[in-house]
Every structure is written in C-alpha cells, then in structure tokens.
Amino acid sequence: MTEAAPGGLLGVATKLDPALTKSDALAGQVAGLVGKLPPVWDRLKFDVTLMDRVVGADSEQIIEPLKHKEPLMLSVGTAVTVGVITNTKKNQVEVLLKRAVCAEVGARIAISRQVGGRWRLIGMGVLVE
C-alpha cells in the first residue's frame, strides 16, 4: 500500500513492544515519514463556534460560553485528548493539552464539555496555531 487515508482500519507492522499498544494506547496516533508529518502540539489555539444547544443531553440545555480553567475533550483528526483552557477571547481559546496531537493549521476540532457527568458535543473549532 502506498497511501492510507482516514475512514477505515489499517494495520501497521512495527517492532514496537506490544505492551505499548495494549488497550489501544496508540489509537488516534499518526505514523509517517520523518519530516513529512504535520507539527505536534501540546497546546492549541483555535477559533471556536459553539452550538445553541447541547447534543445528546436529555433536556435541551443552552451552551454557556467557555471559561478559563475549564476542562474540554477535543477530537483532532483521529486523536482524542483532554485539555484545560488557559486563555479565552471572544471567539478564540488557548488550551493546554494532557496528550499532544499531530495536526495541520486549519484542522477542525470537535469540542466536548462535561454535562451531567458525560462528555457532550458543544461545538467545533479550527486550529490557528
């Protein structure tokens, strides 16, 4: 195979210790040639568009603006990570990530917040730096 794209399953034979891949520890990670991969980010700055109402909640809850030090779950490409908001502006936030992600500037980000003890989709973002 010369090229793979998101949307399907792909197995890659490596010499990694199987303990590293146990319980899908590497799920969502990116493999590629050295120097050809997008940058790795441990903090993200992105433009935010929040929805009017929480997706999947039992009652129709209105989405409040994002707050400083609020935890968020972010889906960036195939990677899912948790981060804490370190700075907020009108339609832009900066988030310090618990687990780094590999993504291009302009990548779309699904934003989830804990609502009633569960992560619920509340909006989307676009990576600016």
Image: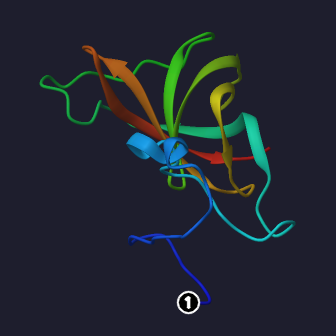
Q: Quadrant of residue 51?
A: top left
Residue 48 appears left or right of 93: left
The residue most toward the left is: 58
Left or right of 45 on screen, residue 17: left
Within-10-Å neighbours for mark 1: few <14, some 14–19, many 20+: few
Q: Give percent across and percent down for residue 29.
A: 58, 53
Judge whether 67 appears above or below 79 on screen: above
Image quadrant in which you'd find residue 113: top left
Residue placed under numbered mark 1 in the picture? 1
Q: Residue at x 46, y 70 (%)?
A: 11
The residue under the point 81% across, 70% down is 36
Describe residue 10's horizontal placement relative to residue 83 as left or right: left
Residue 115 in the figure: left or right of residue 86: left
Image spot of residue 119 (x, y percent): 33, 27
What is the count of numbered marks?
1
Image location of residue 53, percent across then percent down: 30, 31
What is the basis of the colouring in this image?
A: rainbow
User: Residue at horizontal 62%, vertical 61%?
Assistant: 15
Q: Looking at the picture, does residue 68 appear above or below residue 103?
A: above
Residue under the image location 42 percent in, 46 percent down:
24
Q: Position of residue 100 (x, y in %)?
A: 68, 37
In which quadrant of the rendered image does the C terminus lie?
A: top right
